[in-house]
Image (cartoon, rainbow, N blue to C red):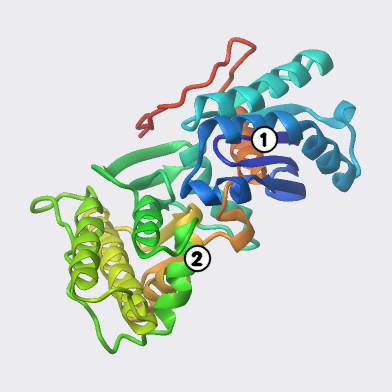
Amino acid sequence: MLTLGIESSCDETSVSVTNGRKVLSNVVSSSVHLHKKYGGVVPEIASRFHVEYIIEVLEKALRSSGKSLKDVRLVAVTNGPGLVGALLTGISVAKSISYSIDRPLIGVNHILAHLYSSFLNEEPPEFPFVGLVVSGGHTALFYCEDTGSQRLLGSTQDDAVGEAYDKVAKILGLGYPGGPVIDRLAKKAFGESAIPFPKSYLGKGSLDFSFSGVKTAVLYYVHNLRQRKHELGKKEIQDICYSFQEAALDALVDKVIKAAEMTGSKRIVVGGGVAANSRLREKMAELASFSSMKIHFPELKYCMDNAAMIGYLGETLYKKGSRSGLYLSAEPNLEIINVK
C-alpha cells in the first residue's frame, strides 16, 4: 500500500513515500541552523520554514520514489504532539492532497512513530517489548504487545533527556543542539575525573523520570567554578560533559532494566533523537552482553524526526482499522492513549 507520509511537528520538514516497511523515499529538510543563535527552537521561525519548504520537500520525495500523487493510496500525517503552527502546516498539506486525489487520511502520534521506528530496520523487533522514547521533548517508557497496542509505564516529570542535554550545552556555551557536542566531548574525558552529579529516582518502583536535578547540579557546579576562575578549561568542560552524560544515561538504563523485570520482557526497543547517542548505544549493548535481552535501535537516519516512520505507522494502524478524516486538527499536547 503506497503511503505518503508528512512530518512537521518541530524543526524538520519531511515527506516520505513508503510501502509497508519499504521506504521508497524519505526527504528531510531541517531548520536547526536558523535556531542555533537562540539556543533552542523558535516556534514562529520553525512554522515559517515549514510553509516555505514543504512543497519543495514533497516534490523531491515523489521524484526520488519514482511515484506520483495518483499512485498514493493513503496519506499519513503527524497531528501531535508538537508546535501548533508547525503541525498545522503539515496537516493542511495532507488534507489538501487527501481531498484532491480522493484518498484516505490518517493522523499519527509523533511519539508512537518514534517508538515503532525500529520496524523500518531490516530485522524488525518482535512483540512484546519494552519501548523507550528519548528525544528533545519526550522521555517515556512503554510496554508494547502489538503495533498500536501499548501501555505507558513512565514518563518524564520535568525536562526530557534531550532538553537536559540542550540546557547543559547552553550552560557550558557549547551551542545548540547540545546532544551531539556533549556526546563528542564526553568521549575525550575517558572517565578519569568523574563528577558525582545526581541521578533522580522518583520513589520506590516508579518508572517516571526527572532530569531537572542533574541539569541544576551542572549549573551550580559551573557557577562555583566560574566564581574561582575566569574561564573553564577544555578538560573541565570535557569532564562535566562526561559526568552529566553518565548520570543522565544511567538513569535511563536503570529504568529500562526495572521495566523489563516488571513486565518479564526480554526485548528493548529505543527510539527518538537521543537514540542516536553513541554512549547510550554502548550502555545498551553492555546490558545485552550480560543479560539475555535483545536491544533494537533504529538506523541513525530514523532516530531524528522523519516522515518514513509516520508513513509506516500510519499504514499499519490504517490496516488495523484506524481512521481520520478532513476534520483532523493539530493537537500540540496530544497524549498517549493506553491500548492493551
Q: Which residue is mark 1?
A: 49
Q: Residues within 10 Å of mark 1 (few under 14, many from 20)?
A: many
Query: Residue 147: image x %, image y %?
Result: 50, 41
| Residue depicted at x 41% and y 69% | 280
- Foreground mark, 2 or 1, reads 1
In this view, the residue farthest toward the front is 230
Q: Which residue is mark 2?
A: 180
Amino acid on which disc 2 is placed: Pro
Query: Is residue 129 at all visible to an observer of this figure?
Result: no
How far apart are the two marked residues, 2 and 1, measured between alpha carbons?
23 Å
Q: Residues within 10 Å of mark 2 (few under 14, many from 20)?
A: some
- 69 and 223: which one is in front? 223
The quadrant holding residue 301 is bottom right
What is the count of numbered marks? Answer: 2
Q: Is residue 242 above or below residue 118?
A: below
Amino acid on which disc 1 is placed: Phe
| Residue depicted at x 31% and y 80% | 236
Q: Is residue 176 left or right of residue 197?
A: right
Q: Quadrant of the N terminus?
A: top right
Q: Is residue 94 left or right of residue 197?
A: right
Q: Quadrant of the C terminus?
A: top left
- 8 and 113: which one is in front? 8
Assign a secondary structure to mark 2. Answer: helix
- 267 and 213: which one is in front? 213
| Residue depicted at x 27% and y 68% | 250
| Residue depicted at x 51% and y 24% | 84
In this view, the residue farthest toward the top is 327
The numbered disc on residue 33 is: none
Query: Residue 140: image x %, image y %?
Result: 34, 46
Q: Is residue 235 left or right of residue 271?
A: left
